[in-house]
Every structure is written in C-alpha cells, then in structure tokens.
Image (tube, rainbow, N blue to C red):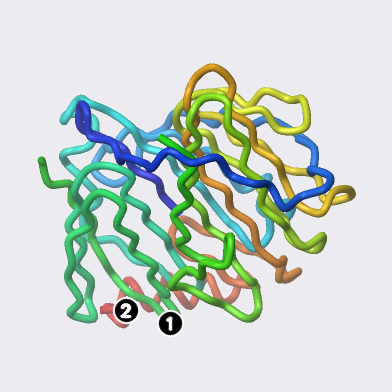
C-alpha cells in the first residue's frame, strides 16, 4: 500500500460542510508510529510506516509506504519492473502523476485522487513511473462511509479505505466494527483522536477493545488523513521482499518462478 503526494501546490479541494458524527464512543490511540525513512524502486525516497513487526497487529495489512516530495530527484526514477505474488497492492495518488504498466498487458495513468488496486495472485511484474505535472469531505475508496460505497469490496477482509479532508474546527465520525483492525495516517496537519494528538506524517494504531467507531478532530488548522481498517485473516505471514505467502516453501517457489520467467 502506497500513498503519494508530490508536486508543489498540488492539492485536492473540498466542500465546506460539518460532519455529524454517528459514533457514541471513539476508539483510543494505542500507539503512534512515525515510520522509517528508506528508499525503494530505483532510489525513490519514502517513509515506511507499516513494517513487518506490525503485520500481525494490523492484519490484513502488510505494509504502508508514504511518499511526499517537491524535489523530482527524490522520485523521478520511479519503480521499474518488479514482481509481486500472494497479496494485493493499493497505490493512492493524493497529488501527482504515475504511469502503471504490468506483464498482463495493463497500462494506466494515476493522477490526482486516482487509485490502483492490483491483485497479484500467482504473480505479476509491473512498474510505476512518475510523470510531471472547506469542509469535511470523505473520498470512499473501499468500504462505506455515510451511505457511500467505494468501488472495492472484499468479503474476507471487508477493507475500509477513506481519504478524509477536515477543515479547522470540524469533527468526523466513522463507525468501525469491533473485529476490524484500524489505523489513521495523517498526511497533512495534526488530528486529535480521543484526546491524543496525531501529528503530520504519523500513523495512529487504533485500539480494538472499546468504542463503536472513531472520532477524528481538526483543531485550528485543516487535517487530511487516511483511515484504513480491515478484518484480520489470521493466517501465517512469510514475506521475502515482494513475495508474501503462508509458508517458506511457497516463497522458494515464487522466487524460482520469477527467476525462470514464469511470472511474466
């Protein structure tokens, strides 16, 4: 799962409206995670927020990479051809342009607000290459919010993926079933959840033991954040780079298939 935001002044607008929260008691913040600066692809500089030690706690989610830069040198080399097997990848382009191609013959351009939700299955090789170019608003990518359904549904994991835009002084409430693991990633501003401040570029892991949802507050400045939740699969997780399987022998098979050209 990747979130991108690059390009000076490239931001999405929202409509001024106050949200009526349908939540009686908010989940609290269990832990704040700032992430680790790293690089991937052909040297793209990013922050890895959800890493392997958190995979079981935030099951079914495996990884969250956040990227934001106004310097083309940080991202222009992109993510040339690379393999995936055994999991789904979600790329959400908050602002910017990204060209996608894969070995199955698919190609598309992600622009502001665009989403690529790719199921690798047995395996696929794809590339992602950058191209140059006030009120509560919720963009529903997966799941449901305020009666609006996103384009993506999965029975097993029931994913929720919301892009939240809160003007200063507003509150948004989102109901969450108790069985769902959930986190909030603030990519602009500073939000407050159950009395805990969540700074910019920080992930808040939301507790599972209380509340019928989450209340997210914006203080004196606007807030933009991603709210992500899903039902855990409770399966073994074995990850080796771009391959995620249940057993080590499946990883060996995936690496062998990639080396021998059977993913293309």
103 relative to 28 in the view: left or right: left
The secondary structure type at the circle numbered 1 is loop
In x, y percent, where is residue 244?
A: 54, 66
* Residue in the picture at 38% in, 42% down: 15
Q: Note whether 130 is above or below 28 in the view shown.
A: below
Picture quarter with the C terminus = bottom left
User: Is mark 2 in CB contact (under 8 Å) with mark 1?
Assistant: yes
Q: Note whether 192 is above or below 88 in the view shown.
A: above
Name the residue carrying label 2. 263
Q: Earlier in the sequence, mark 2 or mark 1?
A: 1
129 relative to 16 in the view: left or right: left
101 or 26: which is nearer to us? Answer: 26
Q: Which mark is residue 122?
A: 1
* Residue in the picture at 17% in, 29% down: 73
In x, y percent, where is residue 146?
A: 58, 61
212 relative to 217 in the view: left or right: right
Question: Which image quadrant is residue 234 in?
Answer: bottom right
């Amino acid at each position: 799962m990747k979130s991108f935001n690059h390009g000076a002044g490239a931001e999405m607008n929202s409509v001024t409206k106050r949200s009526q929260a349908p939540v009686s008691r908010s989940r609290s913040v269990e832990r704040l995670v700032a992430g680790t600066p790293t690089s991937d692809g052909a040297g793209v500089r990013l922050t890895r927020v959800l890493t392997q030690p958190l995979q079981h706690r935030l099951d079914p989610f495996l990884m969250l990479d956040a990227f934001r830069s106004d310097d083309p040198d940080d991202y222009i080399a992109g993510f040339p051809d690379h393999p995936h097997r055994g999991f789904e990848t979600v790329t959400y382009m908050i602002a910017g342009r990204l060209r996608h191609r894969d070995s199955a013959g698919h190609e598309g351009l992600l622009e502001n607000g665009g989403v690529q939700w790719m199921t690798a299955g047995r395996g696929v090789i794809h590339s992602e290459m950058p191209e140059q170019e006030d009120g509560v608003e919720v963009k529903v990518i997966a799941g449901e919010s305020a009666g609006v359904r996103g384009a993506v549904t999965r029975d097993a994991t029931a994913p929720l993926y919301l892009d939240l835009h809160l003007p200063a002084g507003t509150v948004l409430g989102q109901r969450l079933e108790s069985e769902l693991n959930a986190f909030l990633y603030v990519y602009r501003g500073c939000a407050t959840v159950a009395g805990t401040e969540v700074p910019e570029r920080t992930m808040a892991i939301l507790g599972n033991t209380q509340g019928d949802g989450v209340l997210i507050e914006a203080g004196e400045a606007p807030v933009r954040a991603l709210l992500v939740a899903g039902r855990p699969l409770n399966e073994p997780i074995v990850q080796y780079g771009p391959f995620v399987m249940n057993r080590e022998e499946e990883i060996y098979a995936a690496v062998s298939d990639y080396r021998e050209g059977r993913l293309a």
